Amino acid sequence: MTTNTTISCQIGTTDASAALGLEVWIDDQKFFETDHVHVAEKISIELPEDESDHELRFVMKNKTTNHTQINEQGDIIADATLTITELAFDEIKLENIVTEQAVYIHDFNGTGQLIQDKFYSEMGCNGTVSLKFSTPIYLWLLEHM
């Protein structure tokens, strides 16, 4: 009998009028896609426990320079971003694990070099947040909590 791990999170936006898109992947399978996150929404995915390594990815797309307001001094005064909060495996929230383990790869929407950054629940640039984990999930959680 195969058991499943439930992966869940809350997605949202700081500007509902900005058509920011999001894809959610586990390994090579896309589980969720939208071209416009305009309301907060809970996403839930069932993953079979198969004693292997996995990668959860959130891919932000469609952001343009029109979604960011900059003043004369070059400071950002308003910005459209996506939020990914309450990430949990089997209802166990991963707050510190995400900050420590997830990697946010982006190039400042084409205006800079490709960088790897920490992820603090907010995506402000087109790019990918990646979290590698393994199943059975409870063993992985014990190793990382």
Image: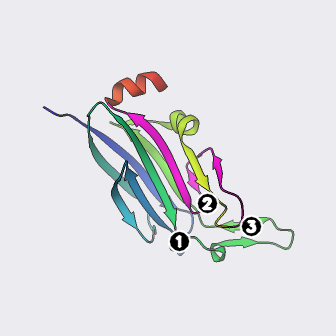
Residue type pointed to by label 2: Gly
Image spot of residue 35 (x, y percent):
43, 71
Residue 124, which numbered label? 2
- Vertical side of 64 occupied by 141: above or below: above
Q: Residue at x 33, y 32 (%)?
A: 135
Query: Dots 1 and 2: beta carbons under 8 Å?
Result: no
Q: Does the magenta portion include 72?
A: no
Please give left or right for residue 25 compared with residue 49 in the image: right
Residue extending furthest toward the left: 1
Residue type pointed to by label 1: Asn
Q: Residue at x 48, y 48 (%)?
A: 85
Dot 3, how many residues are within 10 Å of its Cα: few (below 14), some (14-19), or many (20+)? few
SS under mark 3: strand
SS under mark 1: loop
Residue 62, which numbered label? 1
Q: Residue at x 51, y 69 (%)?
A: 20
Image spot of residue 17 (x, y percent):
53, 75
Q: Quadrant of residue 134?
A: top left
Residue 77, which numbered label? 3
